Image: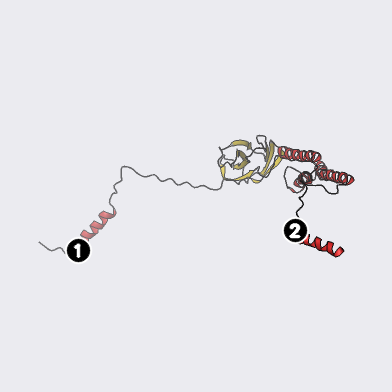
């Protein structure tokens, strides 16, 4: 076989390289689709979200509309916060910054949780949201009536039973009512209202009534010759000890 010259080898190698470079690719029968989703800024979430007590069955919601937002949606649920725009029940959806929810019951064991979303002009909802609940509000009607009924019962009972412990309990319940309103920090009760201040003074004055009952009892006992109120039966007299017997005999002998 005739040996190839160097120039011929060079031409063959160059042709192979060009064939590989400009080869036509073979495509598969199917292709995979790749979807890239990018989420950017929509609008700001509502701010200053607050709940104000109106009654045991009605609260007022106030907020500041989010930046670049056209509408605000408020949704509520019992016992947990709504985390999607279709969870719970709708309280409000519109351009305002206040609304009233009359579907609550502060006497219920479960708090009502509210969530607020912003909606842009293009109708897209913001990913961020704010939450608030009625846990800091208290049912005045039920709790106040319960405390008041307890105080009245103890006061009436202390007038029938002349025991100092019962009268002490009655006075402490009245004091508890007064300090609960004065220092409880309850959003429903405004200490600056005149009728609230009068009510506190009435409770403090009523706290003295059971002690006046006890004072009257002690005065009657003193009049009847009984200086102190007796509790239970009279104590049993203990038998004198041997030392006391010896002491008495010795005393009688020295007196002779």
- Residue drawn at x 86%, y 45% is 221
Give residue 150's position: percent from left, percent from top: 74, 40
- Closest to the observer: 185 or 226? 226
Q: Which mark is residue 241?
A: 2
Query: Secondary structure beneath disc 1?
Result: helix
**Label 1 vs 2, first from the N-terminus:** 1
Question: In the rendering, at what x and y percent does residue 206 appear?
Answer: 82, 43
- Judge from the rendering whether residue 87 lies leftward or rightward of residue 152; answer left or right: left
Residue 103, numbered circle? none
**Up-down: is 239 above or below 56?**
below
| 153 or 103, nearer to the observer | 153
> In this rendering, does residue 93 appear at all?
yes
Residue sitting farthest toward the top: 103
Outermost residue, right side: 223
Farthest left residue in view:
1
- How many C-alpha atoms fall within 10 Å of the one at disc 1: few (<14), some, or many (≥20)? few
Q: Which residue is mark 1?
A: 7
Disc 1 versus disc 2: nearer the observer: 2
Residue neighbourhood size for the residue with mark 2, other residues' Cα within 10 Å, grouped as few (<14), some (14–19), many (≥20) = few
Q: Is 244 drawn above or below residue 216 in the view shown?
A: below
Give the total number of marks visible in the rendering.
2
Viewer-nearest residue: 93 or 88: 88
Q: Image quarter for residue 56?
A: top right
Where the C terminus falls, by quadrant? bottom right
Which SS class for mark 2? loop
Q: How is the image coloured?
A: secondary structure
The alpha-carbon separation of the residues under discs 1 and 2 comes to: 142 Å
For residue 70, say whether it is visible: no
Q: Position of residue 39 (x, y in %)?
A: 51, 47
Q: Quadrant of the N terminus?
A: bottom left
Give the x, y percent position of residue 158: 79, 41
């Amino acid at each position: 076989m005739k040996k190839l010259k160097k120039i011929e080898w060079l031409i063959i190698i160059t042709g192979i390289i060009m064939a590989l470079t400009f080869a036509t690719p073979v495509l598969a029968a199917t292709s995979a689709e790749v979807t890239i989703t990018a989420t950017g800024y929509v609008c700001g979430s509502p701010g200053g979200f607050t709940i104000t007590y109106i009654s045991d069955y009605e609260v007022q919601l106030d907020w500041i509309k989010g930046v670049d937002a056209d509408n605000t949606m408020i949704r509520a649920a019992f016992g947990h916060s709504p985390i999607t725009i279709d969870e719970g029940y709708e309280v409000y959806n519109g351009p305002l910054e206040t609304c009233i929810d009359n579907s609550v019951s502060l006497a219920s064991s479960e708090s009502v949780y509210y969530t607020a979303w912003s909606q842009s002009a293009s109708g897209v909802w913001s990913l961020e949201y704010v939450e608030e609940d009625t846990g800091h509000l208290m049912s005045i009607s039920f709790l106040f009536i319960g405390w008041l009924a307890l105080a009245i019962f103890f006061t009436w009972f202390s007038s029938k039973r002349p025991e100092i412990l019962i009268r002490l309990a009655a006075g402490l319940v009245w004091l508890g009512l007064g300090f609960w309103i004065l220092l409880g920090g309850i959003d429903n009760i405004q200490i600056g209202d005149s009728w609230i201040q009068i009510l506190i003074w009435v409770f403090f004055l009523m706290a003295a009534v059971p002690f006046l009952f006890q004072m009257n009892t002690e005065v009657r006992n003193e009049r009847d010759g009984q200086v102190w109120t007796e509790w239970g039966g009279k104590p049993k007299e203990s038998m004198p000890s041997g030392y006391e017997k010896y002491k008495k005999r010795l005393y009688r002998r020295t007196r002779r």
